[in-house]
Amino acid sequence: MATIKDVAKLAGVALSTASYALSGDSKVSSKTREKVLEAARQLNYRKNGFAMDLKRSRTNTIALILTDLSGPYYSELIRSVQDVALSNGYDLIACSSMGGKDSTAVKFLREKRVDGAIVLAHNITDDILLSSASAAFPIVVMDRKTTGEGLISVVVDGEQGGYDATRHLIELGHRQIAYISGPSNSFDNALRYQGFLRAMREAGLEEKAKWRLGGSFIREGGYKATKMMMMQGELPTAVFYANDEMAVGGIKALEEGGVSIPDEISVIGFDDIQLAEYVHPALTTIHQPMHESGSLAGHLLFQMLNGEEVNEAYKLKVELIRRNSVKQI
């Protein structure tokens, strides 16, 4: 089994530098850190190998690492994972990934401050996940497909959801459809956008660049993106917001602008948060199994902690929920 001395020798750095790099210490330059991480990958080195981890007493705690702790989607996810943790006699620590590689969340992973983790945070890189996970320190990743020792992926079929949402609009006669996106580096947003484009291509429709706007998956972002869309004069007949939070913000902006939903413009979202059926008009959306995905991630994590075999990846289905924010034209 490779040692840290082997890693330092291959990377051509001092032993102390290799140690700092593998710990994510900010005193090491990004170039040097990448060189050390590449050497560790080549040697299949793990900072906390299986034998070392066996000596570590369990904390009876797992971590849930999220991009953001606010908002209805994350709240539902936290509740579902917490239920599973408590049923297994474990505590749950939910923390934000803000700060990236220097965040507390990364320290939980690299320093094994908990017994395992569930990660839904696009700014936690694959390198961090691969260098942290092991058979004794399992990680369930919920926002991408990542494979490696101790790594399991749980994803929702966002591509199909994006397709179903757009196809629903097309079948009702809409030909001018805008897409309000989440963060550009979000795996979930990329899947939904791929589905949107697939449905548009099948119908022989082209996306207009002026209607491709970003809302960062937050209500204020959806509001601002919609205001920008309205400032350009010509409106589409329908808008697909890549999540419900942005759609709620967009509905407010359209209402302020005197644009009637769905008479003048149809609106569809993604997630099916609780608020979706209470806004006016009630929001047509793509339901994704938020509670179920969190529960599944939790159960898989505890199966791995107990040494049980699990599949490398799981994909959950979505469902179109028809309400009053979309009409035929």
Image: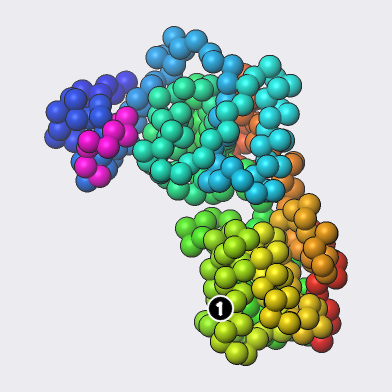
Amino acid, disc 1: Met
- Residue 180 in the image: above or below residue 79: below
Residue 207 falls within the magenta-colored stretch? no
- Which one is nearer the viewer's eye here, 68 or 28? 68
At a point 67% along the width and 59% down the height, the residue shown is 245
At a point 64% along the width and 24% down the height, the residue shown is 302
At a point 27% along the width and 21% down the height, the residue shown is 3
* Magenta-colored span: 22-30
- Which one is nearer the viewer's eye here, 134 or 43? 134
Q: Main secondary structure of the magenta part?
A: loop
- Residue 306 in the image: above or below residue 39: above
Left or right: 247 as drawn, with respect to 124: right
Left or right: 126 as drawn, with respect to 63: left
Q: Name the element at disc 1.
A: helix
Question: Looking at the rendering, in which quadrant would you find the C terminus?
Answer: bottom right
Whether residue 177 appears in this view of the structure is: yes
Tell me if mark 1 has few (under 14), some (14-19) or many (20+) residues whose alpha carbon lies within 10 angstroms of its own: some
